[in-house]
Structure formats: structure tokens, C-alpha cells
């Protein structure tokens, strides 16, 4: 790592903190999870910066959760509107099919009608 962090300001290699996942070789050939230490006068500054960072992060996470919840609510409302429209269109399609059947029935009833025969002869 470069030793420069935009959040905490510039730090030299001596003052860098390694993460918990960084490991240092131990005497038994394995690795141990040790952190490099800051000089004691910087601990207060780093702790305060870390606390502020965590506070901002917590607030951002809360805003994100609220935004996601609002997005989900909007999707659910939109779903209901679309379902209602879909139901109306299904009813309209059903009614139109019914009307077609009724008109065909009327046409079949007048198949042998004198008016129908006269119109066929006129062609």
C-alpha cells in the first residue's frame, strides 16, 4: 500500500496500520495477526477520524436502506396499478369476445331471411 489515504490524510510507512487480514510471520513458521502500532500521540486523532468515518458510513448505510425501501414500495404500488389495468383489459377482451359471439348468432339467424336473400341476388 502507498501509505496515503484520502480519508485519514498522509501517513508514512512507519505509521501505517495493517488490516486484521494482514499477517506477520511468527517464530513458529506460521503467521500471526499483529497490527503495527501508531505512536501514542496519533492514536487519539486516528480514533476520532475512525469514529467520524464510521458515523458517516452508518448514516450513509441508513440512507441507502431507506432509499431501497422507498424504491420497493414504489415498485409494489406500480405493480398494483399494472395489475388493475391488466384486469380491466382482460374484462374488456372478454366482453368483446361475447359481443362477437352475439353478432355471429344474429347473422346466422338472418341467414335465410328475405332481406339477406334479396341483398345476395342484387350482387
Image: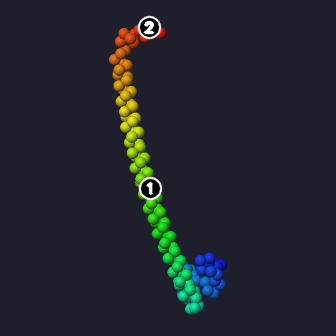
In this image, 14 relative to 87: left or right? Answer: right
Q: Kindly identify the residue that appears in the image at 61 percent across and 84 percent down.
A: 16
Q: Kindly identify the residue that appears in the image at 36 percent across and 9 percent down.
A: 114
Label 2: how many Cα within 10 Å (few below 14, some 14–19, many 20+)? few
Q: Compared with residue 40, is residue 63 higher up or lower down, i.e. above or below? A: above
Mark 1 → mark 2, Cα distance in angstroms: 64 Å
**Residue bearing the label numbered 2:** 121
Q: Kindly identify the residue that appears in the image at 38 percent across and 30 percent down.
A: 97
Q: Quadrant of the N terminus?
A: bottom right
Residue 77 appears at what percent x and percent y? 41, 53
Residue 84 appears at what percent x and percent y? 39, 45
Q: Which mark's residue is nearer the viewer, 1 or 2?
A: 1
Camera sees residue 31:
no
Q: Residue furthest bottom?
A: 40
At mark 2, the secondary structure is helix
Q: Colour scheme used in the picture?
A: rainbow
**Residue bearing the label numbered 1:** 74
Q: Camera-side residue: 14 or 26?
A: 14
**Marks 1 and 2, the one that precedes in the sequence:** 1
Amino acid at each position: 500500500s502507498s501509505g496515503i489515504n484520502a480519508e485519514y490524510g498522509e501517513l508514512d510507512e512507519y505509521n501505517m496500520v495493517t488490516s486484521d487480514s494482514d499477517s506477520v510471520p511468527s517464530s513458529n513458521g506460521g503467521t500471526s495477526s499483529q497490527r503495527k502500532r501508531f505512536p501514542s500521540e496519533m492514536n487519539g486523532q486516528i480514533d476520532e477520524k475512525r469514529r467520524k468515518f464510521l458515523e458517516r458510513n452508518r448514516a450513509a448505510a441508513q440512507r441507502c436502506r431507506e432509499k431501497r425501501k422507498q424504491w420497493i414500495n414504489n415498485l409494489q404500488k406500480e405493480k398494483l396499478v399494472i395489475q388493475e389495468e391488466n384486469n380491466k383489459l382482460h374484462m374488456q377482451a372478454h366482453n368483446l369476445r361475447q359481443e362477437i359471439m352475439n353478432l355471429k348468432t344474429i347473422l346466422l339467424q338472418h341467414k335465410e331471411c328475405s332481406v339477406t336473400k334479396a341483398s345476395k341476388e342484387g350482387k
